[in-house]
Amino acid sequence: MKKILFYYPSNKRTISIESLIIGFKYQGYQVILLTQSDESELHEQLHKNEIETYTYVIKKNKAIIYYFRHFLYLIKFCKKNDINIVYSHLQQANIISVFAQFFCSSKFYICRHHSSVSGSERNFNQSLFDKVINKLAKLIIVPSKMVQKQVCEVEGVNPNKVKLIYYGYDFEKYPKPNQNEVKKIRLQFSAKLLLVKVARLVPGKRYNELFNVLKKMVIDENKDVKLLVISEGPLMAEFKTYIDSNHLINHIFLLGNVENVIDYLAAADVVPLLSEAEASNSVIKEAGLVSKTVVVCRNVGDFEDYIEQQINGYLIPKDNPERDLDEVLNLLYNENPRYIGDGLKKSVLNTFSIDAVISSYYNLNNF
């Protein structure tokens, strides 16, 4: 029986990773989780499925010492436990794995979860880490065609060592909407067109473009539209000022983080997301689970891998999206056909269910 290690910095639940770990166990592999964080919800879920979990937690006082200690521990762990395969996830683990692989007999598969980073969000260390990881990795697994394009065409990685595998989800792990809560949300934020956007309040999520279109619809055209913003971030104060100064306090609501995101998505008429970069966004898939109409940008993440224009969603240009966004939202204000959201749900289930995706790992696990 082959032993597969998932090496992961976080202890937070990520349904796609959790689903894959459990899926491998059901295929007959011995699967182990090692995190750089204390035991928490992810470990608890895996324990319920009789999967071993371990942690190695150290303080990050000096970066070079921090990474070197993790590097030594990972090598020791792989040798002690006779690990055959390591699936390394996220940059903080990947930078350690690409060096550790030269001192272990284990095969290391590097799983990348981000696309490009631009503007004020660019970080020198992150860019440097990407260059090192790209150079040393023997195989990089990416979750979408756009990330594959970014890695191969922009960052210059040999396409032969980049493999596209979509995220796989056990969608039964997602909570079902509480219809009483959904009704309360619809009543509290009553509108002819209710928008819900779930994304960090950072420049890359491009809230300003959405705010400007909503302002035009509400102030200039006197339309009954409301927007619920779910999440937090450094632009919160700036957005509050914008809302106040443009007399939109009854139309844009900054709700911060909420636990029942699925209820808000179920209450929405439309779920817009104008991100300039994504790897494989989960919110749009969750919106699909509750059959909602989505508006997203072309050439971003995996949206075009499963969304077809006016069949199961709306795709607008990434560059200067305001005019097209305005056109789409006005169209949906007058008519929002149910088949759009139903089509998205079908596409999400067919493309991203763990049963559909897990076979893509067969050759990697059976070398």
Image: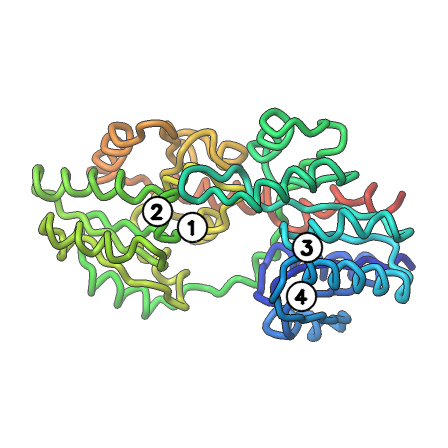
Residue at mark 2: 271
Q: At x 35% / y 66%, what residue is drawn?
A: 179
**Residue 110 location (% of width, % of height):** 72, 46
Discs 4, 2 touching: Cβ within 8 Å: no
Which mark, by number, is residue 36? 4
Identify the mark nearer the N-term, 4 or 2.
Answer: 4
Label 4 secondary element? loop
Q: What's under tag 4, amino acid-wise?
A: Gln
Relative to 358, is 73 above or below?
A: below
Please give left or right for residue 116 compared with residue 271 in the image: right
Classed neighbour count for the residue bearing mark 4: other residues with Cα under 10 Å, few (<14), some (14–19), many (≥20): some
Classed neighbour count for the residue bearing mark 3: other residues with Cα under 10 Å, few (<14), some (14–19), many (≥20): many
Classed neighbour count for the residue bearing mark 1: other residues with Cα under 10 Å, few (<14), some (14–19), many (≥20): many
Label 1 secondary element? helix
Discs 3, 4 touching: Cβ within 8 Å: yes
Q: What's under tag 2, amino acid-wise?
A: Val
Label 3 secondary element? helix
Residue in front for this viewpoint, 60 or 324: 60
**Residue 283 location (% of width, % of height):** 45, 51
Residue at mark 3: 93
Residue in front for this viewpoint, 133 or 169: 133
Residue at mark 1: 287
Determine the CA span between mark 3 and mark 1. Answer: 30 Å
Q: What's under tag 3, amino acid-wise?
A: Ala
Relative to 161, is 342 above or below?
A: below
Discs 1, 2 touching: Cβ within 8 Å: yes
Relative to 166, is 261 above or below?
A: below
Determine the CA span between mark 1 and mark 2. Answer: 7 Å
